[in-house]
């Protein structure tokens, strides 16, 4: 059960729910609200939370850290 991550869209963002093991075999739900913002910061925070949950963490000395950016421009399909 500790590999379960649930994401639910709510009025002002997303509720991220996972389960923390308190005792051997006994898990309690842990919820966190990620607030959505107009400048995409909320979605970036949500994606970083998912990455961290699955073990992708920032390494100060690493050469291959995950970067989530909104800098790619779209293009028109013809």
Image (cartoon, rainbow, N blue to C red):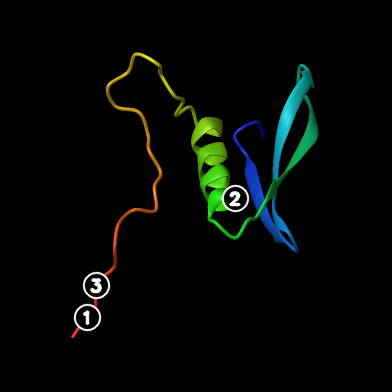
Relative to 18, is 59 on the left or the right? left
Please state which of residues 22 and 41 is positioned toward the viewer in this rendering: 41
Task: Provide residue 75's location: percent of width, then percent of height.
Answer: 24, 72
Of label 2 and label 3, which has the lower sequence position? 2
Task: Provide residue 34's location: percent of width, then percent of height.
Answer: 68, 46
Residue sticking out furthest to the left: 78
- Residue contact at pointers 2 and 1, CB within 8 angstroms: no
Q: Which residue is mark 1?
A: 77
Instruction: Tell me how many marks there are.
Output: 3
Name the quadrant of the N terminus. Answer: top right
Around disc 3, counting alpha carbons within 10 Å, would you say few (fewer than 14), some (14 to 19), or many (20 or more)?
few
Around disc 1, counting alpha carbons within 10 Å, would you say few (fewer than 14), some (14 to 19), or many (20 or more)?
few
Q: Residue at x 30, y 57 (%)?
A: 72
Rendering quarter of residue 67: top left
Of label 2 and label 1, which has the lower sequence position? 2
Q: Element at badge 3?
A: loop
Q: Which residue is mark 3?
A: 75
Q: Element at badge 1?
A: loop
Please state which of residues 64 and 50 is positioned toward the viewer in this rendering: 64
Task: Provide residue 15's location: percent of width, then percent of height.
Answer: 72, 50
Relative to 39, is 12 on the left or the right? right
Relative to 70, is 46 on the left or the right? right
Q: Residue at x 46, y 25 (%)?
A: 57
* 3D distance between C-alphas at marks 2 and 1: 29 Å
Task: Provide residue 30's location: percent of width, then percent of height.
Answer: 77, 35
* 3D distance between C-alphas at marks 3 and 1: 6 Å
Q: Residue at x 75, y 64 (%)?
A: 11
Please state which of residues 8 and 48 is positioned toward the viewer in this rendering: 48
Q: Which residue is mark 2?
A: 42
- Residue contact at pointers 3 and 1, CB within 8 angstroms: yes
């Amino acid at each position: 059960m500790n590999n379960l991550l649930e994401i639910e869209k709510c009025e002002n963002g997303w509720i991220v729910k996972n389960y923390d093991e308190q005792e051997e075999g006994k898990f309690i739900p842990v919820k966190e609200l990620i607030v959505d913002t107009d400048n995409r910061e909320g979605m970036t925070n949500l994606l970083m939370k998912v990455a961290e949950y699955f073990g992708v963490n920032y390494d100060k000395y690493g050469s291959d850290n995950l970067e989530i950016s909104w800098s790619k421009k779209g293009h028109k399909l013809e």
